[in-house]
Amino acid sequence: MIPNPPSPNPFFAFDNGLNDEAHRSLSAKAETLRQLGYDGVGWRPGRVLEMRAELDRRGLKMFTLYTGAWIDGRSPPYDPQLPGIIRQLQGSDTIIWLTVHSSKDRPSSPAGDARALPVLRKIADLAAQAGLRAALYPHYGCWVQTVEDALRVVRRLDRPNVGVSFNLCHCLRCGNRDRIPKILRAARPWLYVVSINGADSKSRDWSRLIQTLDRGDFDLLGLLRQLRALNYAGPIGLQCYNIPGSVRENLTRSMRAWRRLSEQLRADSNRVEQFNGLEGRFGFPAATAPPTIGAEPRLGRKGSTLRSGKLDSANDSSR
């Protein structure tokens, strides 16, 4: 078992990373999560009560339920099982995680807003009756494709239990890498859940945009520092879609990387505490974060940006 020091946010694995011959049973999935130190899982419709029971036995949580809504006039506009599943999840604090699709509208088109609002309000009200929240899941190629799309809809929706999520791989696929600090600041009041993974940040190939957490060139520490600076304390999910190899090896690699990142964040916090301890002795102003935390990439020499405190050269059906 990997040692389990405290981490800054609950960390869960997507269920798409729990599928191989050794993990056919729900108990095997839940047990691997427990052994490796994950806080739970992001699930989808199907055997929800059974999986919740397996998680409960191990002190784990079903953080999200991933499902879709359609705004193109089809009936019903969501999985017909969804109302019953929401009732089964009553009081669980599971977030209903919604992709939003349309065969009539281009991705991101505001022309679909008027048709989307009644569909999403219905789901929001079902969730509210069960004491649950819902979050829109920006997904490349879907009608809600970007965080900005999700924010536009949520503001018009005007339901206090509906927010948004930030999904790293889809943000990168949309070409928004350099805008991530601005996107996170705009999303923060409505940000319910975040998903991350290892990624090659300039790629448009899903096999490079979704890797284990220890692979790829994307600056994950910088992203987590930005979230910390925004006081985001919600769950962070590990996107695992279509990563080759064994479930246990992939989840082990990602958990080791998560622990390293968490230790670096803890070191940041310790430095802030040490600095603030000098305030009373020398009259220094209190610090709230190390100087590089939460800053947008700053231009250094031509073609470079300052990320994670270092100067670096600037170089479906998925989840």
Image: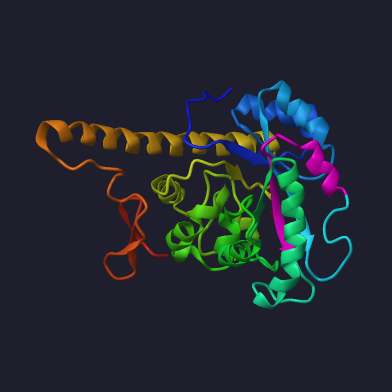
> Is residue 110 found left or right of 297 in the rendered image?
right
Number of labels in the image equals: 0
**67 is higher (above) or lower (below) than 74:** above
Which quadrant of the view contains residue 33?
top right
Instruction: Compare residues 121 and 134 and report the one nearer the observer.
Output: 121
Q: Quadrant of the C terminus?
A: bottom right
170 in the magenta segment = no
Image quadrant occupied by the N terminus: top right
**Closer-to-camera residue (204/176):** 176
Res 124 seen here: yes
> Residue 239, percent across and down?
63, 48
Q: Residue at x 70, y 38 (%)?
A: 246
Quarter occupied by residue 10: top right
Q: In the image, is 65 to the left or to the right of 297?
A: right
Percent x, y of residue 190: 55, 54
Q: Which residues are magenta?
A: 81-100
The image's colouring method is rainbow
Q: Residue at x 60, y 60 (%)?
A: 170
Query: In the picture, residue 271 is in which quadrant?
Result: top left
Q: Residue furthest left?
A: 282
Residue 11, image x, y percentages:
57, 37
- Residue found at x 74% / y 51%: 125
Residue 76: image x %, image y %?
A: 88, 60
With respect to residue 77, does 196 lie above or below?
Answer: above
Would residue 105 appear left or right of 1 to someone viewing this image? right
Residue 196 appears in the rendering: no
Q: Nearer the viewer, residue 248 or 162?
A: 162
Q: Residue at x 81, y 37 (%)?
A: 88
> Is residue 96 in the magenta section?
yes
